Image (spheres, rainbow, N blue to C red):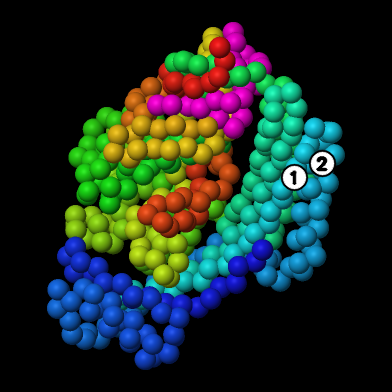
Amino acid sequence: KHLPMVRMTNTVLTNGDTTGFAHTADLSEPGLLAAAEAAAAAARGGGGGVRTVELTRADTTSQPVGTRPEEVAKATKVELLQRADAVARSAGGAIRQVSASYGDSRRQILVANSDGLLASDDQTRTLFVVGVVASGDTGMQTGRRSIGHTMGFELFDRYQVEDLAREAAEQALTKLQARPAPSGALPVVIGKGGGGVLFHEACGHGLEADHIQKNVSVFAGRVGQLVASPLVTIVDDGTIANEWGTFAIDDEGTPAQRNVLIEDGVLTDYMWDQLRARKEGRPLSGNGRRQSYKHLPMVRMTNTVLTNGDTTPDDIVADTPHGVYVAHLGGGQVNTATGDFVFGMTEAYLIEDGKITEPLREGNLIGNGPKVLEMIDAVGDDFEMGPPGTCGKDGQGVPVGDGVPTLRVTSLTVGGTAA
């Protein structure tokens, strides 16, 4: 569906550790003043008063849009869904259910603050998802493929929905023939684009400055220390063209940036919003984000990636006598205070004698984020972004991206069901 932009505003005033916040749908001068007064009252401990500020418009460039989704006929969008549905259902008699979803949104932002900043952004995102359920002797199995970018309807010049439907159906059908995943500590190879969520969840959240200042992160106080294999460089980058977590400015008006968090295994910095950066005297990193005008900004990731290494993916697999190859990771849980995590393997295969062999099903990866960073012993040269995601934190969801090249972890606990 199309999500229309609704013009709203909010006011945030900070003084030390105190934040006053108010929002309104009334854009009249009295409505705006009332919101400002409400926010000031909430933060009154720091004094009040009125100060006139001259605003200077920042030079920002939004991601280009070729075709506005709101200008595309609904029938054209419905046709995409019908085409995907037909292709997925034609993949085999074992297909029991197909779900195809289309979505687009446009979010126009104007930020003004008492530092004299005036900045704007116009964000259009377009999304397509295909889910398939197949049934056989091993029960019900699922397949899923999704695409999403910060762009318009030209997304479908780049991708064919038939390909997504075919891949989702093949994934579900393949899992019908899969053997149960093994159990125990094994070398794990994660395929390009398929495991970025591991670094987002098990590492990225622990590098957000609010967790650092609350001392609930295993990475607190470790800047300048070796926290990962020297092969590991992790970047949070809100500037990657057209990616799901990309924007011109964050929700506090700070330009998107490329922030190196871990470089050659050494922790170099955290991610910051205005409140935490001012408290620590740190430069802003463009990570102050909110779900909507009704929500308070907080430190959030954008596009979090593990950068390329110099080993070919074929060599990584060939150098693994026995283990598990994970093409796609699913959802999971992580404890940011300890780094412990559990992730589902939505598409995985056995590695035998340096070759990818049988498909696997019903398995999880269990481990600890900081330890995984230390146990990465091979990083491929085939970097790829993964599917679009929504990151949830403190009741807020924001669009994020992630990406990885093929990589190997020397040992992870595989929670399978094989005897």
* Residue 88 falls left or right of residue 191: right
State which region is magenta.
345-367
Q: Residue at x 54, y 37 (%)?
A: 330
| Residue contact between numbered discs 2 and 1, judged by CB atoms under 8 Å | yes
Res. 62 in view: yes
Q: Position of residue 33 (x, y in %)?
A: 33, 87
| Mark 2 or mark 1: whose residue is earlier in sequence | 2
Number of numbered discs on residues = 2
| Residue highlighted by disc 2 | 89
Question: Which element carries disc 1, helix, strand or loop?
Answer: strand
Query: What is the three-letter code of the residue carrying label 2?
Result: Arg
Q: Residue at x 68, y 56 (%)?
A: 102
Q: Relative to 250, is 170 above or below? A: above
Q: Which of 405 and 59 lies nearest the eye of the viewer?
A: 405
**Is 241 covered by the magenta stretch?**
no
Main SS of the magenta part reads: strand
Crowdedness of circle 1 by 10 Å Cα count: few (<14), some, many (20+)? Answer: many
Res. 406 in view: no
> Which quarter of the image is occupied by the N terminus?
bottom right
Displayed quadrant of residue 229: top left
| Residue highlighted by disc 1 | 98
Displayed quadrant of residue 325: top right
* Residue 47 falls left or right of residue 154: left
Q: Relative to 409, is 204 above or below? A: below
